[in-house]
Amino acid sequence: MSKSQGHQTGEMHFSYEMLEFRPEWQFDDSDSGVYYHSAVIPGKLFYTSLGGDVQLQAAQKGIPYIERVFAEGFFNDRDYIRIADYSGVSKATINSRLLYAKTLNRLNAKYNCNPVVTYICGASQMLKAMLRIFSNVVNQHFVFVDSVEEAFGLINKQIPEPTPPEKEDLVITRKEIEDFAAMCGNLLFNEQGDKGSDEDVIPPDHPLIELYRIVVLLRNDLVELRDKEKKQSERTEKALEDAHRLNERLAEEKSNVEEKEKIQQDLIENLKKARVEAESANKAKSEFLANISHEVRTPLHAVIGMTELLLETKLDKDQRYYTDTLYSSSRMLLLLINDILDFSRIEAGRIDEEKKEFNLRQLFHDIVDVMKERASYKGLVLSGSLDQGVPSSLLGYPGYMKQILLNLIQNAIKFTYRGEVLVTASLVSDSPKEVILRISVKDTGIGIPEDQQHQIFQPFTQIDSSSTRKEGGTGLGLAIVRKLVDFMGGEIQLESSEKEGSTFSFTVTFEKVERSAMEVAEDDAGMDPGRKNGAVSETIVNKQQVLVVEDNTINQKVAQAMLEKMGYEIDIAFNGAEAVEALQRKEYGLVLMDLQMPIMDGYEATKTIRNSGQVLNSDIPIVAMTANATKEDRQQCIDAGMNDYIPKPVERKVMKEKMERWLPL
Ligand code: ADP
């Protein structure tokens, strides 16, 4: 059946008895006494009877019962008649009324049905007024009746709704108005207003009773609003209080944080101070060590030199054994002192090598050459290999590279008893300006237990093992290696497993060197500084007279003994001034010049020899003997006009090399 305009009952007769009440539609709230009773005449009529003090909570509970009625589909796509009996309602809040109205609208829309006429029983005047306005808006027709029977009577007779009663003339006395005003005031503004006495003010049949009901409704709404407002302001107050407390706590926290920050700041300051102190103490220690080792080298120089000489004399078996021990012990002591000197120099920040061009291939070759003997003595194979792509000319620190590799190879040979030691350089990356190389020293030795691997780079640390005890050492080698690798911008790494071997490796970036054709040609010609100096080559004559300029008598004796043993004749000068004098009197083939001397030091003496025109041969080769062969010292020697230098303590082998170079016999 499609929707029809207007409502028509046709021949049908409707009565209350025809209403079907299903239990599942009946809502009775035992808590509040609120009820929504619903019934239908299927397809025709929807009936509800509401009652009690309808607060929102109860109204919400009742809604599903009404929904169930519509869900049966009685009114789908239809017009229907509605009877709503409000006579049981004692109070209804605005919200519960709204909820009810909205629910009905929603259901009508959902099931596409339309209540063409709604008969309303027991509505208050105000409700009536509101519904009238509402009916215009929703285009619905409301008929207000006194009872349900009247509603049915009207439906059956299809008589038009009764026209509102003619406006009656009501006679209201001044007293009544005053009483009414008092009642309204009482109701509206006195929450504890006694309802009973209010009712007494006006008799029940008085025409003002409707107004009274309206005021009661307004009062209820007002009370509800006030309650809400009170609760809201309580909540606001509490929130404010909470915020206030939170604020106080925040302020407290902030001052705590500030205090903590201050303590932290103080701590940092103290730490900084401590660090500066520690650093300067460390530097002082390193300087002290550097100086003391320097001082120790002079007498040690004598011990080694003399022992070497002693070993070349005729000795019986016992004497040779004692002298051998003396020699190897003093050599060990020298190694130790050299290590300490190196380490403390590095610690004191005295890293003085400057970047220069060098040939890594040549460096590898030289080192492997030097160490080969030691390796084969232990039955080990020592080999070196470089990737094809490694450029031969690089810019870096060849001295430090040498020191690092020597240390690592020495250790590898020391702690390997069979197998091999392999030194490699491989290309990690190559760009027009620079190369990154990975350099490693790999052995098949005893290996290093994992838990001790991180310690061995610490100064004076050795693995506690019988091998270490047997092999000796200072525990400084790797500390030096690490510092030098750090200095070059790399990082030393160790991979090792016990009984299998160790690999020490590091990555360094080297700048490439652009070489001119001339430089390459010069290099190929194999020029060295000696040959560049034409004057020097002239002095290589049969002169075997050597002038030793040295203030320390032990050193004098060592030099004298060594040189005489080699077949030179020597004179001694105690300082630079004596040396100049001697060179004025006699022509020598070579001067061995100490640097630090009283009256006139080695630099000044050299300058005088070269420039004063006072000596017989101002071009005589001068070889410095220096204990502290730093870059500055060497440069100073060259600047002063010296040709070469021998590091102190002077070793026989080195002395022999230098003598053969500058004054061959
Ligand atoms: P040392 O002068 O004692 O060799 P290092 O600092 O060079 O001092 O080495 C520290 C310790 O690390 C050594 O004593 C040894 O115990 C261990 N070590 C170093 N290199 C190796 C290696 N290639 N194989 C096994 N152990 C090694």
Image (spheres, rainbow, N blue to C red):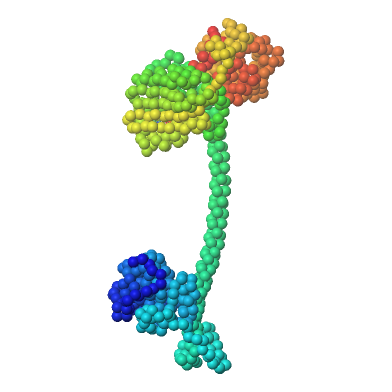
The quadrant where residue 26 appears = bottom left
The residue nearer to you, when weighing 62 against 286, is: 62
Quarter of the view holding residue 475: top left
Q: Is residue 568 visible from the viewing direction of this image?
A: no
Residue 660 location, x and y as percent? 53, 11
> Does residue 388 appear to the left or right of 297 in the view shown?
left
Q: Residue at x 51, y 89 (%)?
A: 168
Q: So how many labels did they put on this image? A: 0
Q: Is residue 448 visible?
A: yes
Whereabouts is ligand 1, in terms of quadrant?
Answer: top left
- In the rendered image, the residue lying farthest to the top is 542
Query: Residue 664 falls in which quadrant of the image?
Result: top right
Residue 137 shown left or right of residue 535 in the figure: left
Quarter placement of the N terminus: bottom left
Q: Residue at x 41, y 76 (%)?
A: 118
The image quadrant where one finds the C terminus is: top right
Query: Front-most of 48 and 421?
Result: 48
